[in-house]
Amino acid sequence: MNQAGRGCDDFYRVVMLNRKHRGSFALCFAGCLSAFTASVEAEVEVAANEVKPLITWLLEDEGRLDDVPFSDVVSAVSGCQVLPVDSRDPVDAWMADALATALNDCMAELNVASHPIHRVGRVNEISRYVEDSLLKLLNAKEELLCEIPVNASGGRQRSGYPDLRLLHRESGRVFYIDPKIYKLGSEQSSFRTFYFEPKKATNKILDDASHLIVGVAHGGKVDGQWQLKHWKMVDLIDFNVRLKAEFQASNRDLYQPTAIIRKSNDPVD
């Protein structure tokens, strides 16, 4: 059995264990997710008999794993631990206060009528301005270093979780920060707003750290001005995620010359 096959087989065994013993799922999830991630990144072909257990799971469990501790996912992918923010710890409390101050200043800055943020048309373009503002404001404090994280391959990348790495220089304490923009009043929405794609080569989590979502609520665009209303800082220490499997392909996969059985002679003008 090849690497991908072993990953599929291990993953299926975990699914079966999860079905029978929900409480003990986290004990073996980390190792199997790590194996499955490695098999996916290897981009090797999987024989039909090796993928069959996954198909069985998709049919029987609707292709979902629920209530997976995010800390277990992080540990499996990166080998790093998710740490709680301890309000009793002087460094943690100071860093959280510094981030809160930066968020207040960020909101004030972005709500100025002349700010370039108001020229963007889509709400998902706002988060880049929040990131840039937080980078500037947090780096203004000599005790801190805020940066775009370096991934496991040594490159610095914007895309993917998390967006920012905040380091307390003296202690070495790290917060990972991921700004999210959401519609005011939508806190109870079930629409997917967080995703994490486990990849070894481009993994950006390289430290034992606290993981924080910074949610910025917007009230839409009024008279050409985005209305940024308030922010919330969320500790992901007890955060659970869901895995939903799907099969996908690109145009390169679809339009292979050997698969095309008819085509028009020339493009229509």
Image (cartoon, grey):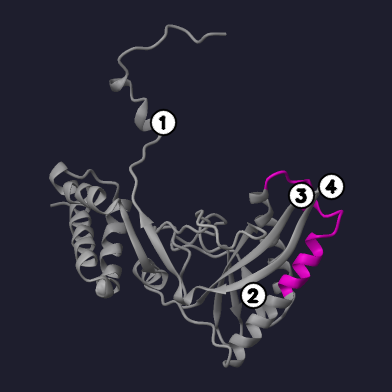
Mark 2 falls on what kind of element? strand
Label 3 and label 1: CA atoms lie apart by 36 Å
Residue 11 visible, this orientation: yes
Neighbour tally class for label 3: few under 14, some 14-19, many 20 plus, Cα within 10 Å: some
Query: What residue does disc 2 label?
Result: 145
Left or right: residue 85 versus residue 252 is right
**At 49% across and 82% down in the image, what residue appears?**
84
Would you say the residues marked 1 and 2 are in contact, meaning their CB atoms lie under 8 Å apart? no
Would you say the residues marked 3 and 1 are in contact, meaning their CB atoms lie under 8 Å apart? no
The x, y position of residue 218, in whole percent, is 70, 58
Which quadrant holds the C terminus? top right
Label 4 and label 2: CA atoms lie apart by 37 Å
**At 73% across and 77% down in the image, what residue appears?**
101
Q: Which tag, 3 or 1, sits closer to the chain's start?
A: 3
Mark 3 falls on what kind of element? strand
Looking at the rendered structure, the kind of residue marked 4 is: Asp
Label 4 and label 1: CA atoms lie apart by 41 Å
Mark 4 falls on what kind of element? loop
Query: What residue does disc 1 label?
Result: 251
Query: What residue does disc 3 label?
Result: 221
Q: What is the span of residues highlighted in magenta in the rendered image? A: 102-122
Label 1 and label 2: CA atoms lie apart by 42 Å
